[in-house]
Structure formats: structure tokens, C-alpha cells
Image (cartoon, rainbow, N blue to C red):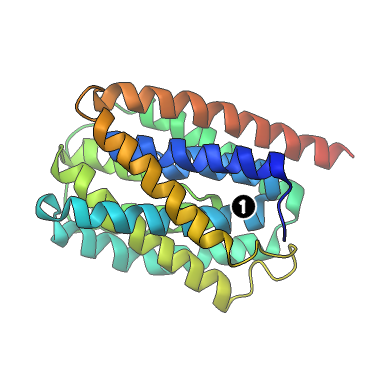
């Protein structure tokens, strides 16, 4: 698949903004890039491409924030994410395109609502909560490209605070991204959805992620994480509504 210049420009902008917000607040790539690419190039290929972008971004930030990572929690979440990722891959393979647009847009929009509505959750932590967060996050990351809101809800319940939470999100996103790519490849979840972008887009994606992350590193000294989260929420909500509308129009047609 060769992207036309306008589509490529919008996709590049979404990747840079997502990487920027990810560096400042700990999340942003999935929330911003997933609805953008899902709208531009279709939900199956768009979410798969989002998984690739997430892997690149999270790998970079894992190295940067290595010292603050809580590896025990990361391990539990990633192990629990394995069955969730395969369930998400099956959903992608068996669902028509219009319904995938609705699932993608609805999942992002609902995740944003739940994240901000669930600020007063009672405190609870333990292995069962880690398993639930990992399995649900794995499924949503594979099916919709977003796992951040699920992790944010778990973090509030567990009183898991920055900087450990923001740093630990990076290997979580990295691992869930790899699981998503592997499960979709094994189950042929994108085989009937059209041609993937050409391989030489990958170096471009890497350069865009580094550009966004470098800008985010500079801005992190001047912008509070809460402010970056507000920006990512507005962008993600707008993109989710556009994808949702496209799915509804597709069904109507």
C-alpha cells in the first residue's frame, strides 16, 4: 500500500503528536494514532500500524525510563495480556469493516469516559487486579490499539503513582504491541483487509517517533503531565467520534 501525500501528512502528524504526548504524560500514542490511522487507512490495517508505532515509541521510552520501571507489575500484566491479545485478534479477523470502525471509535470514546469518570475508585490491588488489567488491556490493544485507559484505571485503584507508573507503561505498551502483532499474524487477522503499507515506511515511522519524543523531552520541563493528558483526550475523543461516524455511515450504506 502506497499512501497518498495528504494521507501520509496526516498520519505523520498523528504519530509525532502521539509520541510527543507519550513522552510528556506516559501515554498518547494509542489514543491519538489509533483513531487517526483507523480513519485514514481502515481499522484493520490502521490498528496494526498503530501497534507498530507503539512498539517503536515504547521501546525508545523504556530505555529512557528504565530505572523507574516496576518490573513485577509489568510481568503480571504482560503474561495476562497473552490470551487477551489472541481474543482481540479473533475479533478483528471475524468482524466486518464497518463494525470494526464502530468498535474502534466506541472503545476509544468509552475508555476516555470511564477513565475520567472513575477517579474516586476505592483502593484495591493484588494479582487478580493485575490479571484483569492485563487481559482486558491486551484485548483492547489488539482490537482497538488502546490499552492506556485500562492501565490508568488500575493505577488509580492500586494508587500506583508517577514516576513508576509512567515509566512502567512503556514496557507494558511494548509487550502488548508485540503480542498484538504476533497474534494477528498467527491468526491472519489482517489478511483479508487489504494491503499493508510498504516496509520502507518503518524507518519513516521511527524518525517521526524520535522527533516527537525529543520534542516531548524538551516540553516535559515546561508542560505538566495533566495538561498533556487533556490535549491527548481532546484529540482522541475527536478522532474516535470521526471513526464512529464513519462506521455508522458504512452500515447505513
How packed mark 1 is, by other alpha carbons closer than 10 Å (few <14, some 14-19, many 20 or more), is many
Q: Residue at x 48, y 73 (%)?
A: 182
Circle 1 residue: 46
**19 sits to left or right of 251:** left
Q: Position of residue 141 (x, y in %)?
A: 46, 54
Does residue 140 lie above or below 175 as drawn?
above
- The C terminus sits in image quarter: top right
Q: Residue furthest right?
A: 253
In-front residue for pair 220/81? 220
Q: Nearer the viewer, residue 51 or 72?
A: 51
The answer to whether residue 242 is above or below residue 132 is above
Residue 132 visible in the displayed image? no
The answer to whether residue 197 shows anywhere in this view is: yes
Query: Outermost residue toward the left?
Result: 67
Q: Position of residue 240 (x, y in %)?
A: 59, 33
Image quarter for residue 62? bottom left
Tell me the residue at 39%/40% (across/down). 212
Quadrant for the N terminus, please: bottom right
Query: Residue 130, how many percent across, how many down?
Result: 25, 55
Identity of the residue drawn at 66% across and 37% down: 243
The residue that appears at 63% across and 60% down in the rendered structure is: 92
Label 1 SS: helix
Amino acid at each position: 500500500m502506497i499512501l497518498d501525500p495528504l494521507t501520509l501528512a496526516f498520519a505523520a502528524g498523528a504519530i509525532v503528536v502521539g509520541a510527543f504526548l507519550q513522552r510528556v504524560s506516559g501515554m498518547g500514542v494509542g489514543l491519538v494514532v489509533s483513531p487517526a490511522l483507523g480513519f485514514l487507512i481502515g481499522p484493520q490495517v490502521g490498528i496494526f500500524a498503530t501497534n507498530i508505532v507503539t512498539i517503536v515509541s515504547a521501546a525508545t521510552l523504556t530505555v529512557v525510563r528504565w530505572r523507574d520501571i516496576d518490573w513485577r507489575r509489568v510481568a503480571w500484566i504482560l503474561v495476562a495480556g497473552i490470551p487477551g491479545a489472541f481474543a482481540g485478534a479473533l475479533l478483528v479477523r471475524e468482524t466486518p469493516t464497518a463494525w470494526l470502525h464502530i468498535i474502534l471509535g466506541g472503545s476509544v470514546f468509552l475508555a476516555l469516559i470511564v477513565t475520567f469518570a472513575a477517579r474516586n475508585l476505592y483502593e484495591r490491588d493484588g494479582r487478580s487486579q493485575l490479571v484483569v488489567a492485563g487481559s482486558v488491556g491486551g484485548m483492547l490493544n489488539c482490537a482497538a490499539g488502546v490499552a492506556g485507559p485500562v492501565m490508568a484505571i488500575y493505577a488509580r485503584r492500586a494508587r500506583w503513582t508517577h514516576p513508576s507508573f509512567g515509566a512502567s507503561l512503556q514496557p507494558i505498551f511494548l509487550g502488548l504491541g508485540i503480542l498484538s502483532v504476533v497474534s494477528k499474524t498467527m491468526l491472519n487477522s489482517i489478511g483479508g483487509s487489504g494491503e499493508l503499507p510498504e516496509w520502507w515506511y518503518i524507518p519513516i515511522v521511527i524518525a517521526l517517533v524520535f522527533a516527537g519524543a525529543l520534542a516531548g523531552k524538551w516540553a516535559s520541563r515546561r508542560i505538566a503531565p495533566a495538561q498533556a493528558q487533556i490535549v491527548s483526550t481532546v484529540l482522541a475523543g475527536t478522532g474516535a467520534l470521526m471513526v464512529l461516524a464513519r462506521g455508522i455511515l458504512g452500515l447505513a450504506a
